Image: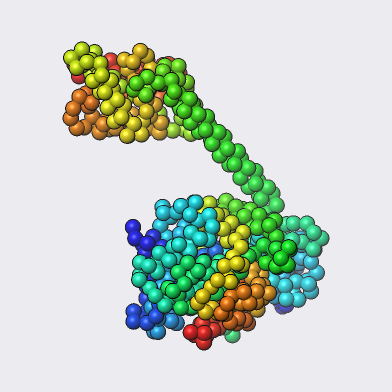
Amino acid sequence: MSLEPGPIPGLGEDASAAEGGDDPAAVAAPDLIDEVTLEDYYDNAPCGYLSLSSDGRIVGVNQTFLDWTAYPRETLLAGKRFSDLLSAGGRIYYETHCAPLLLVEGSIREVAFDVRCADGHTLPVLFGAEARHTPDGRTVFRATVFDATHRRSYERQLLRALDEERAARQEAEASLARLKQTAQPASDLSGLPNRRWWKAMVAAELREARRSDAPLVLALVEIDHFDRYSVLHGHPAADQLLLQVTDIWRRAGYDLMARHDGEAFGAPLPGVTLAEATQLVDRLRRGSGAATNFSVGLAEWDRTETGDELGHRAERALADEKSRRG
Amino acid sequence: MSTLQAHNVHVAGNPAGPPIVFAHGFGCEQGMWRFVAPAFEATHQVVLFDHMGLGGSDVSQYDPAKYETLDGYATDVLAICEELDLTDVTFVGHSVSAMIGVLAANREPRRFSSLVLVSPSPRYVDDEVAGYHGGFTREDIDDLLSTLDANYLGWSAAMAPVIAGAPDRPEVATELEATFCRADPVIASRFARATFLSDNRRDLLAVEPRCLVLQCSEDAIAPQSVGRYVADALPNAELRVLDVVGHCPNLSAPDQTIAAIRDFL
């Protein structure tokens, strides 16, 4: 790259104009700036500068980039492409992403690459480039390269943390799924697991809600006047009704589970707020028939209480609803 | 949603002319053809589309299992042809889409009259046993995947305004700004795997339509020896080497690309 050495246009004059001012720094400044030539600005900038021809060949490079990568200037200017200096993956990425973007949009920023240096070590960089059109109609790309060693290792840590967190989440989901599966065999006619599983399930849902920072509502469901229904229509009909009610909930995506002695059933509603749960209940009750006659007690987890405490609040809500429905 | 909407299909040009379908490669979208496709509008019915998960396609229809291999992409090409009721198709596929076109043509040979394979490679990874030089090792492909990861961290994933428009061609910028070369990181990574770990050497042997292999003189992704291999393996193909450095002659040398396709047709 040949650049005419000389003072920075404009800058020198501005500084001279400040001469004679009250500020002593303004007097000292011209000396410093006079030593700074365009060439110096270019060659010893705190970042690498490259000029690339439209097909990616290096046609200009500053001293900083040479210092960082240990390549002799002649080597790079002998027809090397910038992508030749990259790792194989970076080369593919350059040709499939960067080159098209530069050709179509004329600009690209903040691309992470690993530059293979002459001495064998790898320099993580952030690369940016912009198209410039010469008066004779050619296109060149002006590129900057920033040392990103520390940033990259920080980003790798973040990515690793993300992977670990993803693995932890998968593990939590898997254990919840296992729990649900184990719960299934311990069921009666209604397909409802027993109380022990209910407690374990609520505890697991609480953990999951805490981890994922999502809301959780506990719903307790009781069929209105179930005993009377059973006496009037017989046990098989009552069992049938029970199945219908649990089926309504199952189709909405929630499995009702036995908590106590087959009186009230419960379902954790993960990711759901109290308002959404209320709407859900209204929707499930729509329609006619005995299977829509059930009371529901809802309580949204306050994020501090235990599973038992949440259960008690839901029980109180259920008792209120039952007395209201008569 | 129809196949045409799902793939952001654009049909232009002469409705009475024979159809020419342009397919973009890995990393980009149909904008790749913007300097080439218009040249065929006077004579051809020009069809452009985006592969699923890229550009303006409907990402909600992305099925990870389907797109695990290039076959899923070939299925889409055939579905688009079917929906538009295209026959005598000239299929122009860039980069990985060259092989997607080969797979599609092998499944429905009668639908295609010819294939134009731009910067193709039937296998990117070297196969020492067969003495085949694809240009990359398995480790290189892993390196690509980690490069993708590194760049999606703060780049494409955030859809950040990192890619500014071209000041001297604002119309290009605004039109493409939203999607050009941007993709969901997980989808891009799967596409990279499907692309760079594919082996379609045997598929070349069965291609019925006549083919044009467009090879760049200096291509870091698909070297000349690979272009030669493709042309030799195809039953009915001619090789044309373009005086172009790079992998995307459709962008960097549209005139040469257009002329070569015209000569062939």
Figure check: A104 above or below B127: below
The C terminus of chain A appears in which quarter of the rendering?
top left
Q: Nearer the viewer, residue A317 or B209?
A: B209
Q: Residue furthest bottom?
A: B263
Left or right, B135 with respect to B160, comes to right
Q: Nearer the viewer, residue A70 or B70?
A: B70
The image shows a total of numbered marks equal to 0
Q: Nearer the viewer, residue A290 or B207?
A: B207
Q: Residue at x 58, y 41 (%)?
A: A162
Figure check: A251 above or below A147: above
The N terminus of chain A appears in which quarter of the rendering?
bottom right
User: Which image quadrant for residue A290?
Assistant: top left
Q: Position of residue B23 (x, y in %)?
A: 48, 69
Q: Residue at x 77, y 65 (%)?
A: A66
Left or right, A291 with respect to B227, comes to left
Q: Residue at x 72, y 76 (%)?
A: A79
Left or right, A147 with respect to B3, comes to right
Q: How is the image coloured?
A: rainbow
Q: Residue at x 45, y 54 (%)?
A: B62
Q: Position of residue B151 (x, y in %)?
A: 59, 55
Can residue B23 be seen in this snapshot?
A: no
User: Which image quadrant for residue A215?
Assistant: top left
Q: Position of residue A243 (x, y in %)?
A: 29, 25
Q: Nearer the viewer, residue A250 or A121?
A: A250
Q: Position of residue A246 (x, y in %)?
A: 31, 26
Can residue B113 be seen in this snapshot?
A: yes
